[in-house]
Image (cartoon, grey):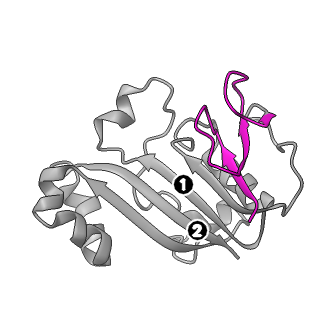
């Protein structure tokens, strides 16, 4: 399986091709991620990993479209980013975006009528939200991750009190 680790930093995923703009990293390709297209061939990866990267890029939509371009059909995108209610979303001055568990729906079937922003189409495989330990022990994390209506209720009303930490997304290229 061929894996691209986007924004790999010094902890590149084992066996992956790393791309990062910082030459002090373990990247195989040094490239500014805000410059498109990236110097990689179309449909050349089975998986694209972007762990704590998407909140740093200049254009989220264009970056996800670039992930899509680089994936083979049926390939997977794995992204991790802070939930906008977590303090880490705002304490890092390099974070440009503050996202929630519905932020990537433009690319799927449930695009709320905004699918015209991109031709890129992804199937949501999973969205996992991690909550602070107290809320996890009280069962809120289970409900957020296993009951779709509860996740919507949580995002709309509860997340300001029952704050999110990290979200992990997995999508499949259609």
Q: Is residue 24 left or right of residue 87?
A: right
Q: CA distance from mark 2 to mark 1?
A: 9 Å
- The quarter of the picture where residue 154 lies is bottom left
Part of the protein shown in magenta: 1-29
Q: x%, y% of residue 67?
A: 71, 56
Sequence-first disc among 2 and 1: 1
Say above or below: 80 vs 30.
below
Query: Residue 6 location in percent, x, y?
Result: 66, 44
Question: Disc 1 designates what residue?
Answer: 79
Image quadrant in which the N terminus is located: bottom right
Q: The residue tagged with tag 2: helix, strand or loop?
A: strand
| Residue situated in front as seen by the camera: 91 or 154 | 91
Q: Is residue 40 left or right of residue 103?
A: right
Seen as rendered, the residue at the extreme front is 14
What percent of the width, then of the height, locates residue 26? 69, 32
Asked if residue 127 lies left or right of residue 104, the reply is: left
Q: Horizontal and vertical percent for residue 104?
A: 53, 60
Q: Which residue is mark 2?
A: 171
């Amino acid at each position: 399986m061929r894996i691209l680790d986007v924004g790999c930093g010094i902890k590149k995923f084992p066996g992956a091709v790393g791309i990062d703009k910082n030459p002090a990293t373990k990247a195989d390709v040094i490239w500014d991620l805000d410059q498109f297209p990236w110097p990689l061939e179309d449909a050349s990866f089975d998986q694209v990993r972007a762990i704590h990267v998407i909140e740093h890029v200049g254009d989220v939509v264009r970056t996800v479209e670039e992930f899509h371009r680089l994936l083979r059909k049926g390939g997977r995108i794995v992204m991790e980013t802070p939930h906008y209610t977590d303090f880490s979303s705002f304490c890092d001055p390099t974070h440009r975006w503050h996202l929630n568990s519905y932020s990537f729906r433009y690319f799927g079937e449930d695009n709320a009528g905004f699918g015209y922003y991109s031709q890129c189409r992804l199937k949501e495989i999973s969205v996992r939200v991690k909550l602070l330990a107290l809320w996890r022990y009280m069962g809120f994390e289970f409900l957020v991750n296993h009951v779709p209506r509860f996740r919507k209720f949580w995002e709309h009303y509860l997340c300001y009190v029952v704050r999110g930490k990290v979200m992990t997304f997995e999508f499949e290229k259609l």
